Image: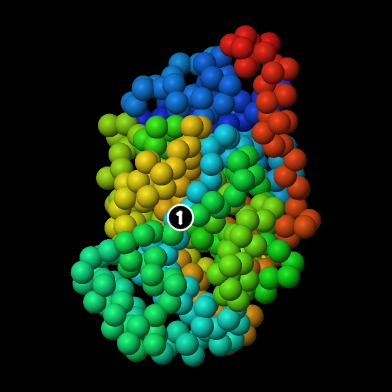
Amino acid sequence: MSGFLPDDAARATLLGRLDLGAGPTPVLLRAGRLHDLSGLAPTVADLLNGLAPGEVPAGRNLGPFAAAEFRPAWTGGARRLLPPIDLQCIKAAGVTFAASALERVIEEQARGDPARAQSIRAGLATRIGVDLRSVRPGTEEAARLKAALVADGQWSQYLEVAIGPDAEIFTKAPVLSAVGWGEFVGIRPDSAWNNPEPEVVIVCDGAGRPRGATLGNDVNLRDLEGRSALLLGKAKDNNGSCAMGPFIRLFDEHFTLDVVRRATVRLEIEGEDGFRLAESSEMSRISRDPLELIHQAAGEYHQYPDGFALFLGTMFAPIQDRSAPGKGFTHYLGDVVRIASPALGVLENKVGLSSVIPPWTVGIGALMRNLAARGLLNGERS
């Protein structure tokens, strides 16, 4: 199955991870063939730190990718792609699109109750929605809008990070906790209002340089975050709540940050109840440039020696009614979520309960023991 690759996969340099039997292994997909890169570096983090920008690593040829027969977990497939990062910190930028900023304000005012959201949405969309789309964060114009909204009693902590000088940058998930293409994503059983957040993810090396991009699902529990922003960790960081993949596409002459800036991201949801949702968004509508978000995440005040992956934010907050009029969208167990962009491929996952889907068991210690046993930490191949 290769339908999840970029449209121009033949010329793309794709970096990922597979378990080839002995344990997690960095691999390269180039011109239709897979290459084992463990002889060059034991982890993707080490590989990106050692590669010069634009350099294409040469590994051990594993044969044609088309012969690999990857299948999602829910079809009984035994071979799947691991998330394409390993030791990188997983960071996220929030409220970077006007549409998502408005929905965060609605969540806050509804106190996590989806039944109240529609009436609040109707009252806020005309005034705040139009204004948010017309200003750049951190400008004098944004400061004037803030003053006007404060005077009207419509100011919010979410608007502060939407149009103020400081972006919201938070830690989405622990190192090594993400799931990859074809795996289950998780929602908590005590959440009744939740949704996927399809995003482009920039992967940076230890020097903070953007080296490539992939797709991500920043699964969010809207009712928990709506009750209180201090519940962000509980709303965002759960078993299976972060998906990434299928590969990191490395930046080169064919794929640059400008391609990311112009990217279209498509979200498709198929439910076992027959529900269908399909929406698209344009990265050109983001309020802060990807480089600005990277610089706010790392630099003089914070360093990440093993690099970091930065979710750039989403404009999606699905509001299509599902269970009943006025209730809006929430996930049902069994939903298949596809996040797609032509230059990055398709990230596909299925929704389950965080308490039931396979637990996260391979942490940093387990990975290091595995790499040591394979002789990869001292440059030897087993």
Question: Which residue is farthest right?
Answer: 356
Q: Is the residue 347 above or below the residue 121 in the image? A: above
Position of residue 118 in the picture relative to residue 241 (left or right) = left
Query: Which residue does the image show at 58% across and 67% down from the upper left?
Result: 230
Q: Quadrant of residue 237?
A: bottom right
Q: Is residue 222 visible?
A: no
Residue 68: percent from left, percent from top:
61, 30
Q: Of the residues shown, which amino acid type is indicated by label 1?
A: Ile
Residue 36: percent from left, percent from top:
56, 20
Position of residue 285 in the picture relative to residue 112 (left or right) = left
Give 142 or 262, whichever is nearer the viewer.
142
Give 19 or 44, whichever is nearer the viewer.
44
Query: Which residue does the image show at 39% across and 37% down from the upper left?
Result: 208
CA neighbours of label 1 inside 10 A, class few (<14), some (14 to 19), many (20+) = many
Callout 1 secondary element: strand
Q: Is the residue 85 above or below the residue 381 in the image? A: below
Q: Quadrant of residue 128?
A: bottom left
Position of residue 364 in the picture relative to residue 52 (left or right) = right
- Tell me the residue that label 1 is attached to: 169
Position of residue 31 in the picture relative to residue 359 (left or right) = left
Q: Is the residue 292 above or below the residue 204 in the image? A: below
Question: Which residue is farthest left?
Answer: 140
Residue 224: percent from left, percent from top:
63, 71
